[in-house]
Image (spheres, rainbow, N blue to C red):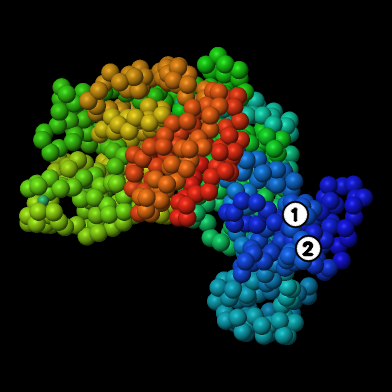
Amino acid sequence: MSLPSSESSSPKEAARHDRVLVVLATPVSGCFDYLVPPHLSVVIGSVVVAPFGNRRLPGIVLGPGTGDVAVEKLRYLEEVAAVATLPDTLLLFMKRFANWTVSPLGAVAKMILSQPSALAPPAMQKQFFMPQIAPPEKRLTAARQRVYAVMADHVRRCAGDISAAANVSQAVITGMVAQGLLDVEHVVADQPPPTPRHDLPGLVLTATQTTAARDLSAMIGQGFSTTLLDGVTGSGKTVVYFEAVKAALQAGQQILILLPEIALSAGWRNRFAARFGVVPVEWHSDVSAAQKRRAWRFALDGKLSVVVGARSALFLPFKNLGLIIVDEEHEHAFKQEEQVIYQARDMAVLRARIEACPIILASATPSLESWVNAGATGGPARYRHVVLSDRVHGASLPQIKAIDLRKTPPERGRWLAPPLVEAIAKRLQHGEQSLLFLNRRGYAPLTLCGACGAKVTCPHCDSWMVAHRLAGRMRCHHCGHETRPQRNCGQCGESDSMQACGPGVERLAEEVLWRFPEARFAVLSSDTVGTPKAAQNFIESVQAGDVDIIVGTQMAAKGHHFPNLTLVGVVDADLGLAGGDLRAGERTFQMLSQVAGRAGRESRTGEALLQTLDPENPVLTSLLSGDRDQFLATEAAARAHAGMPPFAQLAAVILSAPEDTKLHEAMRLLAASRPVFDNVDCFGPAMAPLAYLKGRHRARFLLRAEKTIDLQHILRGWLANVKLPAQVRLHIDIDPYSFL
Ligand code: ADP
Ligand code: ZN
Ligand code: ZN
């Protein structure tokens, strides 16, 4: 039995008691004591399987048991998983993460142990190879000769690969083994991915790039540091951070690269492969369970050098993490809004701190937070700031101009104003490409009855159903509810009275077809281009010149390189500002600069035209003058004045319930015990702007606090004493991005 050794000195040994504390991979608060059966032995960080109710759950041993529960009531651990012990840094990250986000530790453990198959013993596989002494070939059948031709390189292969390559049945292979013509060995089926090579030559860097690359590489192995890599689109940020990756590879360390899911294009993948000789190991929602299993295990074994992934890759059990890169660090996609609500960029900085390694945040339009942290507003610089100010190839940034829709409006029922139409026509004449940007999926955001004015709304949400004519459906963009479009009004019964209001990309495409019947156009949105494969095909067809006009949502704004694209038309530059939440201006600025940056990436200068009803808006004037820092400075001053992040802290508490009465009961309970502290404001409860979502009524509190306050502590204290009615759910959103 594993001995209770009270005199043990090493912390790893401290858990060698017969009673251990375990966090289970399930979103409950609290950890549980378990007994260790005599045939098992565990240490802190052991991954175990434990009974919980009538389920079996994976969990992590955190230390000796607390002794709070009588021994007779404790249950035994069932298994120790066939994986290495989790590193202390990961356990510390799990605790700090839960602490920061005020989420149950078990919910974070669940994100770490997200791949149940990674915990099972590795599968075995037969591998075949040429025997030392091969018999003369001419005595072999044709099929066997083909097998030998394949195996002549002395590479070990599984039966499936051989039968495919040699076009023989597996029986041929077994027969050859029986006669000693092939040797076989049982090996672990999962083999580590090939290590990226650090000895391949990269591009010849410009002088500025060289300085930046040296600067970043010098941080490798020097402990924790955060660097904001701030460079205009096309300045070579990727090229530069690849040099830091190279340095970390040389030092034998592991590297994590986080990208917003949407940015992980084949283009990025190919560039990585060209630089490092192998395709990168990926981790995101499109990766198969088998690949995730391998990535997880090899990250823990230290045999996986580089992972590129979406935010969930942050929870991989790296053994020896030496560098984190967050590309497009300003992207809101890094904020997870469901279940455990967290900002992956911020948590990546936390992880780097715990792992004592450098982290690089890269962007052409840095988040206000990172920019302020880099000391750009004159405050203390917590981040290093490395700037790449020029585009390579001497390409200049696009000229950005506004089209004042009050002066030159489009015709009734159309959305493209005359100056934009003219600009597109000119591009068509010159054989150049245009992008029309409208961040609205579908055909029309609103459908209403021309007779009585009734709007088509979602039965589960406070929202309009969006017409998707290509799919022939009406869709709710909040909950995914779908119906067939109705021709007759559901309210007044009038027939053929339903009218589409406002444009989505599909409707814009209709206008393009009407105006330019000869032009070849394509719609780029998550509805038309749903998979990474489809996206890749789309990008290739644009690059091959098969498309004259792209009509696209935010999918079209991201990192693609279209050399022949010289015009970007933003159909509604005011759209993103309408909501008016804390980051509306910042988000609009980022998105519009990003989309404008699609124009003129090579020698030809690009042009971006922004259609607006409000050209004096500070977001637009900063865009037009090309003065990003001016925009950030104004925005920072406004936030500081209003006492808003990043100069103060915000936290939202969101309540939801299927029944209105239950929700109000919960609101009253929480309001009655609302926190009262100096320098902390508690606003609400108020019904959420989206007061009904996915069949649940919703209300919100908002807490604002000075930066010195431990807001998480206040939240925990408040919520610990409130017993919410059944069916009421409570979510805490630290530093909320969505105020709906
Ligand atoms: P960013 O990430 O800042 O937008 P990238 O790293 O994607 O910039 O570089 C933009 C383009 O310029 C890419 O096609 C890249 O291959 C090219 N590029 C960058 N630096 C160089 C260089 N030193 N020599 C040649 N091409 C370069
Ligand atoms: Zn009607
Ligand atoms: Zn809905």
Q: Which mark is residue 68?
A: 1
Q: Residue at x 51, y 42 (%)?
A: 732
Task: Find residue 531 and report its image quarter.
Answer: bottom left
> Which amino acid lies under the numbered mark 1 shown in the image of this protein?
Asp
The residue that mark 2 highlights is 71
Q: Position of residue 113 (x, y in %)?
A: 63, 56
Task: From the top left corner, tell me how far across and down residue 420 is, in percent.
Answer: 21, 30
Q: Check the picture and name the quadrant holding the C terminus.
A: top left
* Viewer-nearest residue: 590 or 42: 42
Q: Residues within 10 Å of mark 2 (few under 14, many from 20)?
A: few
Relative to 69, say whether 331 is above or below.
Answer: above
Taking 551 as reference, is 190 above or below it? below
Closest to the observer, 291 or 479: 479
Image x and y of residue 418, in percent: 16, 29
Which amino acid is tagged 2?
Answer: Val
The answer to whether 66 appears left or right of 530 in the picture is right
**In the picture shown, does residue 290 fall above or below 575?**
below
Res. 522 visible in picture: no
> Residue drawn at (59%, 40%), measured in percent from left and top?
716
Q: Is residue 353 visible?
A: yes
Task: State the image quarter where residue 50 is shown.
Answer: bottom right
**Extreme residue toward the right, this view:** 7
